[in-house]
Amino acid sequence: MNVKNVDNESDNNQIPTFELFCQVHIGQFLQIGLPETLYKPLYEKLYPVEVFDAGESLQLIAIESEDDEVLEFNLKVKEEKGELKKHEDVFLIDHCWTWDTIENAKKILEQNHLIVGRLVNIMCIKEGIDTEEDLDEAKNISIIMQQCDINYDVAKECYLEAGGELINSILIAEEKKNDSNQFGQFEQAILNSLINKDDDSNNNNNNNNNDDDDKNENQNNKEEEENDNKIEINKIIEKMKEGFAQSYVFAVPLPDNQYQYQRAWYILDEIGSSIEFTENKEEENCSCKVFVDSFRGITYSILFPTKDISSDDTFISTRNSETYNELIKREKQKK
């Protein structure tokens, strides 16, 4: 059982009574479809401290490929528990990450390796480069970055524009740099990079060569790590767009009793992300919906069974919102 004391996070350390808790949150209860029998259990898992006890009744089951690679996790009732009855219990599900736009999300991921590492595990992304195609692309992009002195995003854009052909990628990068006037002349540097430099190396001191080799190796290792991180982040972003990310809309008070509505995107923790999501309401056997504790100002998701669930069953729920790709497609259709 994971218990977290959050009293200090609240502006008011006093615990609300159960009656006041229900009075303030009744609108959310009705919208979520939380049965009245679970009002008190939810209250008791929020106060006086948060109780994340889903692990006592539920477990994650790894689904593996023939090569023993973990493809995804499913959420099931523990065998010793046997069965979870309809409306028997309610569980707090944490949001491991919340953000506002995909653009900002990418910036955060580039600066926070801890979030990247956690999401790689949640999404079952194989770390780093996992195919020959990824390997070739990463190597070529690294060459473009080195020879043209440009960042990863620009190098990849040139590489894709050239259809994956290295020399043309460098020429496109050269043209872009000349057009932007952001960089100096570097045609000779590109030509030199394509020439065998064996004759030049014979004129250098062996010690200097060793020092240069060490520097180059360190630089290459650093660039490989950066490339691996970029590839992981791109995979995370794609999975977020496809369905790992869900959203909710909240109101921000403005002067004159007006409100501005904003959308927040979030990814559920390891347990929540292991729920199988469906568009068919008839297939679901549980509900996992956003809940805002108005007293603490903290957002969770709450999970409860809407049917009897045995240890052989996988937890299935409808989404709290459209996927990112679905939302963007609908917004474009409006225009």
Image: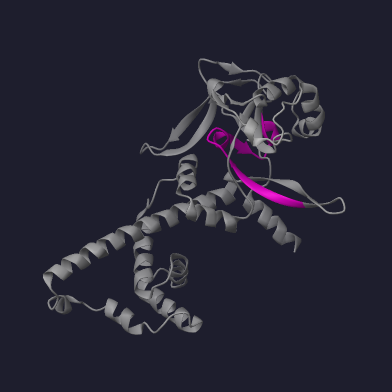
Question: As rendered, which of 76 and 259 lies closer to the eye?
Answer: 259
Scheme of colours in the image: one colour
Residue at (17% x, 79% y) in the render: 200
Q: Does the magenta stretch include residue 101?
A: no
Q: Position of residue 33 (x, y in %)?
A: 76, 30
Q: Is residue 262 magenta?
A: yes
Span shown in magenta: 261-290
Residue 204 in view (yes/no): yes
Indicate left or right for 58 with 225 as reference: right
Indicate left or right for 88 with 22 as reference: left
Q: How many marks?
A: 0
Q: Where is residue 76 in the image (x, y as percent from the top left)?
A: 54, 26
Residue 102 vs 310, above or below: the answer is: below
Question: As rendered, which of 229 and 161 lies closer to the eye?
Answer: 229
Residue 311 in view (yes/no): no
Indicate left or right for 32 with 315 as reference: right
Indicate left or right for 229 with 317 as reference: left
Question: As rendered, which of 315 and 29 lies closer to the eye?
Answer: 29
Q: Where is residue 129 in the image (x, y as percent from the top left)?
A: 37, 53
Q: Give the quarter of the image for residue 31.
A: top right
Question: As rendered, which of 252 and 233 lies closer to the eye?
Answer: 252
Q: In which quarter of the image is the C terminus?
A: bottom right
Q: Where is residue 37 in the image (x, y as percent from the top left)?
A: 75, 19
Residue at (43% x, 65% y) in the render: 152
Residue extending furthest toward the right: 256
Q: Quadrant of the N terminus?
A: top right
Residue 246 vs 78, above or below: the answer is: below
